[in-house]
Structure formats: structure tokens, C-alpha cells
Amino acid sequence: MILNFSEEERQFLRTVSDWVDTEVAPCTRAWEKSTFPDNIWKRTAELGVTSCVLPKEFGGRGYSCATYAEMCRIIAKGDPALSMNVAAINALCVAHFEHFANEEQRAKYLPGVLSGDIPLAWGLTEPDAGSDARRVKTTATPIPDKPEFFHLNGEKMFITNGGFAKLFIIIARLDEKNLSGFLMEKDQPGFEDLGRIPTTGVSASYTLHFKMNNAVAWHTPGSFEDVTGLLFRGRVGIGAMALGIAERALELGIEYSKEREQFNRRLADMQSVQNLIADSAMEVEAARLLVHKAAWMYDQGMPIVKEASYCKLFASEAARNVTNRMLQVHGGRGMTFDYLIEKLWRDAKLTEIGEGASEIQRLIIAKQVLR
Ligand SMILES: Cc1cc2nc3c(=O)[nH]c(=O)nc-3n(C[C@H](O)[C@H](O)[C@H](O)COP(=O)(O)OP(=O)(O)OC[C@H]3O[C@@H](n4cnc5c(N)ncnc54)[C@H](O)[C@@H]3O)c2cc1C
């Protein structure tokens, strides 16, 4: 499937690609040891990376889902953690403003979001609510005499970019049946930072655990289904991130197999190694087609419930398989920190877990196919 991009989108993707080559990829190891630099969200805002899908009428770039997917893929080739953050910020956070915020809320926050002064994060997961997102316990209680404002009480964990974020989109419970989205500033007495969560992969991301004790938040009305419906396009972004990881791993494996010699021949000339490379090349290509198809359908205004799951599930398992095979091609060196393949192998794991684990994607697909 050939995706069509406007000239502006093509130019944008070229700019992103140059930026990844010069400012992202060379830093991936250093960022993993600490986190992104302080200016990261200013820089991404300047490039249009964090406003890629926001319509032009709201000050964004208004690019297609296909462009968003390509951007996530390209960034993942340089730094998977940054791709994960960018995917979530676009599809879950900025898109929340587009779909659920009112004029006043947009006027207050969007200029800061677009300039990079207000980094965002999206908070659904809690200690007792992961795959079963409807178990969210965080409560939202109306504040008397302050229409549209609520007190939030509860705990959120695994929140991507939580360390940098100044504003959170929080999913909280209005009553026994209803959940909805809220805008919550970090800088307030009701916000309690419970610390960064170190992770084995994508660890440059500042993943946060926090508590809300009567934290003041502004309601952005929308049902739970509507708010979490943003995850469909989000999954295309994570699928594209997985595709970028798999592509990079394959490149590294091919390169290494052509350099290393054993038994007086290159690894690339040995059939067992060729099989690892052939299977990987095929999975990368199949993942690409599923990512492109889901993005294309989204851009045509078609529902992508099933296709978003196909692409995220397949691409994430391809990323796992390809990084694993290419680490094998690297032999013992693949297990050292001198070779990037081990990092990609660890980073790939997130794509099988975040934004709905693989088992949940299979449940979604089965439900669609069996109905
Ligand atoms: C690095 C990182 C970043 C993240 N960023 C964010 C973020 O920004 N915002 C946010 O809200 N969340 C975020 N998450 C949370 C992520 O979305 C959850 O980890 C994920 O949804 C799984 O939930 P859980 O970890 O509670 O696992 P659980 O739900 O406890 O699941 C554990 C295992 O059981 C399986 N399982 C559960 N239910 C079923 C079922 N019905 N049938 C079959 N198998 C099942 C799961 O697939 C999984 O394999 C992040 C997580 C990580 C690791």
C-alpha cells in the first residue's frame, strides 16, 4: 500500500528524519542513563512533532494519521522511548484537547502546549486498574460553587512523561458507572509525587507514580468510551514505534552479519543466519503493511477498532522477534552494552504492554471477528 503525503507532510518528515539523525540517535544511550534533556519538549514543539495531528484551526500541523505513524517510526529508529512519549502526547493528550476541551480550556492551555512550555501526560493506569481500565478508583467530586471543577482523589502509576508534565489528562470516576477525563495541573498542593518508576526498556522516559489528594481538576466532559476511544489512533502510533525498532534491529543485524567472520566465511553467508534475517525482513514488511493500512483507514474516516489492534499486536510481536533474532546474530557481543541491539531488544518489550497488552489486543480482535 502506498501512502500519499502532501508536500508539506513530506518536508516535515524529512525534517524529523534529519533531527533524529543529528540530535536524537546520537544521544539514545546517554538519555537512557538519565532522561531526556530539559529542552526536549521545547525542541519537539518547535519542530511540530508534538502538534503533528492537532488540526490547524487549533494551531497544530493538522497532518494525517499516516504522517503521525511515519513520524513515530522514524523517531523510534533513533530513540524508542522518545517515540513512545511523542505517540502518547499526540494521540492521547493533544487529541484530548481537540475532542473534549472547551474554548476556555483550549485558550488557557493550548498556547503553552504548542510552545512546549506545558508538557503533557495521560493518566489512566492505577495500581488496581491496568488492562481492566474500568476499575479506575480515582474519584472526581464536584467542588461547590466552582462549576466544571472537581476534586480528584486517588493514585496513578506508569504515567509516561509524568516527570516532565505540567498538565495531566486524568481519567477519574464521577460515580459508580461513569468515568471521564479531567485536566489537572501538577503544580498544586493536592499533587503528591510518589517517584519515578525505573523500567528495563524505554527508560529515558520519565515514567511517574503519583497520588492526588483533593487535587483540583477541570472537567472535559466525555464518556469513558469516547475518551479511551483515542487509544485506537494511539495504537497505530505504538505499532509504528514497534516497526521502527524492528527496522533498526534488522539493519544492525544485517550490518553485523556482513562484518563478522567465523569458519572462514561471513555470518551473512551461513544459511541459519540467513534464515533469521529472511524471517525478520518478512515480518518487518508485514508489520509495515498493517501499520499503513490502519493509518490509511483512519485518514479515510473509517473505524479502525480491529485494524488498530492488528497493527499494534503484529508490529509489537515482530519487534520482539526481530530484536531477539538480531541479538542472536550478534552472538555474545549482542549481550554487551557496546552494541545497540541489546537496547532495542529491551525497548521492544514496551510495545507488547503499553496501550493495551497483546492479550487485550487479541480479545478485541476476537470480539470483532466473532460478532
Ligand atoms: C513504560 C510504560 C509506560 C506506560 N505509560 C502509560 C501512560 O502514559 N498512561 C497510562 O495510563 N498507562 C501507562 N502504562 C500502563 C500500561 O498501559 C499498562 O501497564 C498496561 O495496560 C497493562 O496493565 P497492567 O500493567 O496493570 O497489567 P495487568 O492488567 O495486571 O495484566 C497483566 C497480564 O495479564 C494479562 N491480562 C489481563 N487481563 C486479561 C484478560 N482479560 N485476558 C487475558 N489476559 C489478560 C495482560 O495482558 C498481561 O499480560 C505504561 C506502562 C509502561 C510499562
Image (cartoon, rainbow, N blue to C red):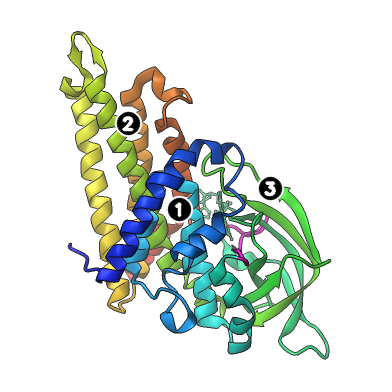
Which quadrant holds residue 97?
A: bottom right
Image position, residue 285 (x, y; %): 22, 49
Q: Nearer the viewer, mark 1 or mark 3?
A: 1
User: Closer to the N terminus: mark 1 or mark 2?
Assistant: 1
Q: Amino acid at mark 2?
A: Met
Secondary structure under tag 1 reads helix
Quarter of the figure that contains the C terminus: bottom left
For disc 3, the neighbor class at 10 Å (few under 14, some 14 to 19, many from 20) is: some
Q: Nearer the viewer, mark 1 or mark 2?
A: 1
Count of numbered marks: 3
In this picture, which residue range is highlighted in magenta? 117-130
Q: Is residue 302 visible?
A: yes
Say which residue appears at 68% left-offset and 47% top-offset.
196
Q: Amino acid at mark 1?
A: Ser
Label 3, label 2: how far apart the Cα atoms are:
31 Å
**Residue under pointer 3:** 196
Which quadrant holds residue 52?
A: bottom left
Q: Amino acid at mark 3?
A: Arg
Q: Give the residue furthest to the top.
A: 263
Say which residue appears at 62% left-offset and 77% top-offset.
109
**Residue under pointer 2:** 326
For disc 2, the neighbor class at 10 Å (few under 14, some 14 to 19, many from 20) is: many
**Residue under pointer 1:** 83
Compared with 320, 363 (above or below) is: below
Compared with 353, 90 (above or below) is: below
